[in-house]
Image (cartoon, rainbow, N blue to C red):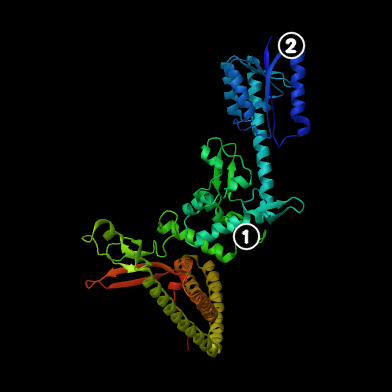
Amino acid sequence: MMRAWFYYRLSRDEDEEMNSLQNQRQILVDYAEQNGYEIIGESFDDNVSGMTFNRKGLGELEIAVDEGKIDVVLVKDLSRLGRHRTQTELFIDHLRQNNVRVYSVTEGIDSTNENDDLMIGFKQIFNDFYAKDISKKVKAGMQQKQKSKGLVLTLPLGYYLDRNTNEVKIDEDTAWIVREVFRLYVDGYGLTTIAKKMNADGIRSPDYYFNRKLADWKPDISKKYLWVQTAVKRILTNELYIGTMVNHKTVTSKIYKTKTFIPQEEQYRHENFCEPIIDETTWKQAQFLLEQRSKINPRSQNGRKLHRYAGLIKCADCGSGFTARTRKWRGNEYVDYTCNSCHRYGKEYCTPHTVRENQLDELVENEVKSLRDNILEESDKYGKIVKDWLRKKPLYEQQIQTNTDKILSLKQQIEDLIIERIGDREHASIYNNMIAKREEEIAALEKKIVELREYDKVCKQRKEHLKNTTQILDEILSEGKISDVNLRMLVNKILIHQNEDKSLDIKFEMNGDFNDSNFIYTEPEIEV
């Protein structure tokens, strides 16, 4: 008596009524009873694609084959076994090598029948094409939803989907964890330190709150739902926390096991998609710190915040960074910074360049105040430039009209030259040179017109920009002491040189706009 094993499968993109697991099983049972097969066992996979062979039910079948328990595998049709033409063929060959045949009940195809080999190959091609075609249509539908209004695929910690309204809402039971992660990072703690702090405080990782099944290959320690550095970074970089849904960031092929990252300009962004958990200022500060720390790679002692100037100070003499040390003197605690070359290798390689943190704080504050005064002075200059432009406005408009008339005249000359060139082809090159010169004159005149029209606009924009920068500096200074995150947003680098008399020369390089206070815009010339 033939020993038979049933295998049946259902995937989400198929007709459940036609291919339901119960319907498939009944077909196999009826066939086995009619042909006198002994049913040894059965296995199935529900909601699993036939393009992958990493399936639980298929694994159970393989174990039975390896143990020599069965003679035939009964399937409703070959597509139940698999839709990937290459892997399906390899699996059927594996069964043949173990003297196990595959029989498709509804198709009447037998893997041991040489006459059916061609049909098996044809069926596999058709099944493979069907699966890829369905996958393509499903992806197109999802992509359209992502583009039009945004699609919620998985929610991060701190949010839940209201099944009644289908809206994304804040879960206050877990949102506090997200806020705490951002607060710690902006306050100066590193990714690894935050993860260790969460574990020490007994706070479970996001996998716990979503009841996610952890991968079998992960070590047993991960089953305790511990935080790791990547989990912290994933929270800090998720834009949904400021209410912005971003779709189409990656494209994954389950068939070919590939993952493609989509450029940012091609992603689908939907602002105000849901209520934010993190305010925009905190978000921008965190993103700035993430970018900066990835470049300067500052280090902190285990479990402690980063020192205020860690990674910012460089020795102007040897190029080395500075080491921070906490010292105590007469009951008081302070931090000083020393050239790392001197600290590690000795004074014969470089001098200490020692500077205290409170001294740097005072110098930075003075530098910011000086910068603010320079920006105010620059802003006043642009105010005078705009007033002067208003006084000269009639002259500028007259010059614009004169240049416009010249352009019209030159264009007419070009048209005349083109007509003359048609009648005098022997001297076409001469006409071409004459036309090219007039086109160059037109381009130069158009550039002057743009400069005359945009001059006041550029000056006004620059004045407004300087005004906004001043307001930012005023807000930073109003806090009394410049915070760690504001310090890093202001200062790009601090260079320290030690003189022969052991005095220090300290130079500050400011970040971005704070280092661009000497903008010069040249006034366009007016022809008289």
Which of the pair 384/455 is nearer the observer?
384
Q: Is 420 rendered above or below residue 167?
A: below
Indicate the quadrant where residue 315 lies. Answer: bottom left
Say whether residue 499 is left or right of residue 64. left
**SS for dot 1:** loop
Residue 382 visible in this rendered orientation of the protein: yes
Tag 1: amino acid: Ile
Three-letter amino acid code of the residue under disc 2:
Gly
Above/below status of 2 relative to 458: above
Residue at left offset 56%, top offset 66%: 281
Q: Quadrant of residue 370?
A: bottom left
Q: Can you identify the residue that label 2 sits on? A: 36
Check if mark 1's residue and mark 2's residue have beta carbons within 8 Å.
no
Closest to the observer: 133 or 497? Answer: 497
**Disc on res. 416:** none
Q: Residue furthest front?
A: 331
Residue under numbered circle 1: 277
* Neighbourhood count class around disc 1 (C-alpha, 10 Å): few under 14, some 14–19, many 20 upward: many
Position of 449 relative to 21 (above/below): below
x, y (%) of residue 463? 52, 80
- Nearer to the camera, 266 or 425: 266
Q: Earlier in the sequence, mark 1 or mark 2?
A: 2
Quadrant of the snapshot with the N terminus: top right
Residue 438, percent from left and from top: 49, 74
Q: Could you give the CA–CA distance between mark 1 and mark 2, rounded to whole angstroms?
A: 65 Å
Q: Residue at x 38, y 75 (%)?
A: 363
The picture places residue 61, in percent across and down from the top left corner, at 62, 22
**Mark 2, other Cα within 10 Å: few <14 / some 14–19 / many ≥20:** few
- Residue 277 falls left or right of residue 466: right
State the image coordinates of residue 156 (x, y, percent, origin top left): 62, 51
